[in-house]
Image (tube, rainbow, N blue to C red):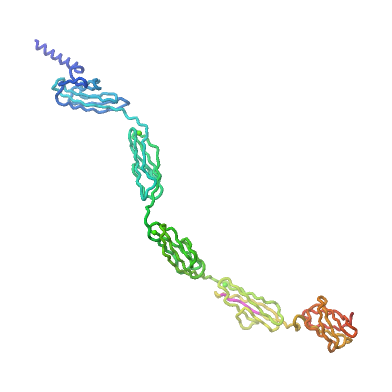
Amino acid sequence: MKKRLIVPMAAVALVGLMASFATSAYAFPTKTVACTGCHSGPNVAITTTLVSTVGTTATYNFSAPAADAVVVFDGATKIFTFLANTGQFAVTTGKTYTLYAVTGPTTGDGVGSTTVSPVAPVVDSAAPVTVSDAASTYVSSGTIKLTATDAGSGVAATYYKLDGGAQVAGTSVTVSALGAHTLEYWSVDKAGNTEAHKTASFTITAPVVLDTTAPVTVSDALTTYVSNATIRLTATDAGSGVAATYYVLDGGLPVAGTTVSVSAAGAHTLQFWSVDVAGNTELRKSAAFTVTTPVVLDTTAPVTVSDAKASYVASATIKLTATDAGSGVAGTYYILDGGVQMAGTSASVTTTGTHTIEFWSVDVAGNAETYKTATFTVTDPVAPTTGKGHTVKVRIPKEHVRGHVATLTDLATGAKFTAAIGERGVAVFTDVPTGRYKLTIKGKHGNKTIRTVVVKDRVAETQYNGEDRD
Ligand SMILES: [Ca+2]
Ligand SMILES: [Ca+2]
Ligand SMILES: [Ca+2]
């Protein structure tokens, strides 16, 4: 019976044990009270998984497949008891919690433990800070490094744009293009904070090279040009580069330049050379060329004019003058009175009468002018003249006898001309200019003015047969 009771008791005790398991039946270890020997059996594996952290509350799942029970301690305080081998619990961040797993209440049973230390999510509102190591000048090429730091969530990425180009992710950029450059750069942290863009300016310079070689200049000069020569000089230099090109035309003064224009016809000589930036001077070169006069197409005949007047006395000399636009006058010709063709620009005629001269010219290109005609007359001289005036014969009335003297007095100038009265009462005055004269006779009755005598051009003889007048 007792045993029978015991059995039920045992059963009850078992039930009671089961009922009190969470509080006392399992002797879990604590931080402050060592349960020495409570559990010394095989290790009971236990793992935790962080489910979430919201604010300061972290939620974990645990798993201890071999365990019968699991407890969670906050320091020395047991805060959760699980009579199960899986479960979930929530704790406040900022502390370390210990989980124990056991397989039974006796010392022969196993035990295991683990800890969790939940932390609150980082609150990050500050952008990263990126710095560059860019120098102001690089020779040949430069490599700029970007270094970003972030307080909080940490740097997610660093970006840059070179000279306004495409956005590139990276922290190092190498530039070798000569000249000035601008690098724009910034970083983004893991919380999504983007740094304000920064810029670095720098210049890539060409390396300094030792240049001991003079430039080389070439010309495109031809040997012959028509009307105008334009010669171009092209210089190249290995090293420091061409500083200047010079030339001398026909031994003149040096001129800086690379283009030479010459329009003066004839032979020319061009000397040219260049100097590089390092000061190396090229030996002068020379080009000889000729500028020729252009061939003009001439289809226009010359034009000839004569100075022929309508009439001439005693003789005529006709001058012919020819001009030509283009090739120029080759020759001038004339035919006088239908005679033989003559070459020349002057024709003389002494034969009295009416004459005709035909004249024309031919140019170098062979264009012949249509002949022109001039008609003129040559007459005999009206009277012989001597010196500056005329010979004047005056017949004096018979009472003024031979041996007396006749005088012509110019009424305008008072000039006097005298002549002896010869046979038949004729007095001959020579070299008397045209004009009006007073005729005076010096006879036995003294001086007597006879009359006025008019001497006209080409009227050589004036006679007076009139009466005496005072
Ligand atoms: Ca940050
Ligand atoms: Ca050079
Ligand atoms: Ca012509």
State yes or no: residue 313 in magenta: no
**Residue that protrudes farthest toward the right in the picture:** 445
Q: Quadrant of residue 389?
A: bottom right
Nearer to the camera, 102 or 303: 102
Q: Is residue 167 left or right of residue 369?
A: left
User: In the image, 108: left or right of 360?
Assistant: left
Of 439 and 133, nearer the camera is: 133
Q: Which residues are magenta?
A: 357-363
On whether residue 359 falls in the magenta region, the answer is yes
Q: Is residue 233 left or right of residue 47?
A: right
The quadrant of the rendered image in which ligand 1 is seen is top left
Q: Nearer the viewer, residue 38 or 82?
A: 38
Q: With 464 as the anchor, is 37 left or right in this view?
A: left
**Which residue is the extreme one toward the top?**
1
Query: Residue 185: horizontal and vertical position, in percent?
Result: 38, 41
Q: Main secondary structure of the magenta part?
A: strand
Residue 72: quadrant of the picture: top left
Residue 383 is situated, as x and y percent measured from the top left of the image, at 76, 83
Residue pictured at 67% horizontal, 80% vertical? 317
Residue 431, placed above or below residue 222: below
Residue 261 is situated, as x and y percent measured from the top left of the image, at 49, 64
